[in-house]
Image: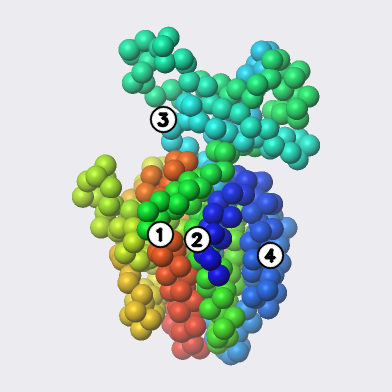
Amino acid sequence: MDYKKLLRDFMGKFGPSGYEKEIAYLLRDTLSGLADSVAVDRIGNVIATFAGSDPECPSAMIFAHLDQLGFIVRRIEPDGFIQVDRLGGVPEKVLPGLNLRILTKRGGYVDGVFGNKSHHAAGADEKYRVDPVTSLLVDIGAGSAGEARALGVDIGCPATYLPFSQELAGDFVSGTAVDDRGGLVALAVAAARLKGKRPRATVHLVGTVWEEFNLRGAMIAARSCRPDIAISLDVVLAGDTPDLGRRYEAACGKGPALVLYSFHGRGTLNGTLPHAGLIELAERAAAEEEIPLQRFAALGILTDNAYAQLEGMGMAAVELGFPARYTHTPVEVANVQDIVALGELAAAMAGRIGSDFPLNRY
Ligand SMILES: [Zn+2]
């Protein structure tokens, strides 16, 4: 399997939170030849199940989110320009001059651009100012509100950055929604490994919805799978660019990362304090399979793992990730080798879950 191509295929699909159908169906089709069963639940989570050989084993849910951040049309101006609100954590300073894709009421797409005041007419103060997304106008080429609505664009239509990917040197890929289409590729890698060697534990590989919106789509998947163990696959922040100084050790191209601590820290009291048995499992699986494993801890990060772990009687949970640069911009960068190794690590962990795995924290 050409996983770089698969990543670019995944990145090419439109899928902001709540509108994950395209990417969900592609993931479903990708996993359907590999897992024992693949289902899409009521809210759109894709659940691929590998039945374990030992019913005494705790079961595991390994998941990555389908959705990407985006925008929602809020108002259409009389002259046809469009105002949007953000859907998820959009870095507003990347927006002016950027391409946008809107899903219309009829199910097609209309492309547009975030306007940026003509440079020749911009005052010195405007050139160095970041304007909030709510003050920007999207130009779809419509001359009036009526013309925009005739194209199917209306209040409530979702939008994303225009899906884009490009290959950089080596095994680097850049573009939109590397977060978390890279995690979905890792799921595909794990599925191929698990198909080759059936695990003792029942394993659910899940593409989750709503992560960039409310982080809670994974909870619904957990309610139908009822797993004992939660392992999430998402980005970690690569600290290998000069702009991050000496903040994190994790670097692209040096393998997947084990997340030892995540906490939102900006108002939301949630994060993941990983289960010691899963830390040990990750480290042992990585060592035995000769997968390099980086360590990562960060304030300011929150994934759907934090909510999934609260389901049932409380799951043993850990977050794994692949390093990514420039997160949430349309030019996120990651190394495909890290993503493949992340999938291999997840499968290696799943394959090592036995009936003696200690679910209690102590
Ligand atoms: Zn993510």
Left or right relative to 149: residue 46: left
Question: On screen, 358 above or below 88?
Answer: below
Q: Quadrant of the C terminus?
A: bottom left
Tell me if label 2 and label 1 are in contact, CB under 8 Å: yes
Q: Write down the residue under mark 4.
A: 29
Position of residue 32 measured from the top left corner of the image (x, y, whole percent): 68, 70
Q: CA distance from mark 1 to mark 4?
A: 25 Å
Left or right relative to 150: residue 24: left
Looking at the picture, which amino acid does disc 4 mark? Answer: Asp
Q: Is residue 163 visible?
A: yes
Q: Write down the residue under mark 3.
A: 93
Looking at the picture, which amino acid does disc 2 mark? Answer: Lys
Q: Residue at x 52, y 22 (%)?
A: 115
Q: CA distance from mark 4 to mark 2?
A: 17 Å
Tell me if label 1 and label 3 are in contact, CB under 8 Å: no
Mark 1 burial class by Cα count in 10 Å: few <14, some 14-19, many 20+: few
Question: On screen, 275 above or below 249?
Answer: below
Which is nearer the eye, 90 or 339? 339
Q: Write down the residue under mark 2.
A: 4
Mark 2 burial class by Cα count in 10 Å: few <14, some 14-19, many 20+: many
Left or right relative to 171: residue 38: right
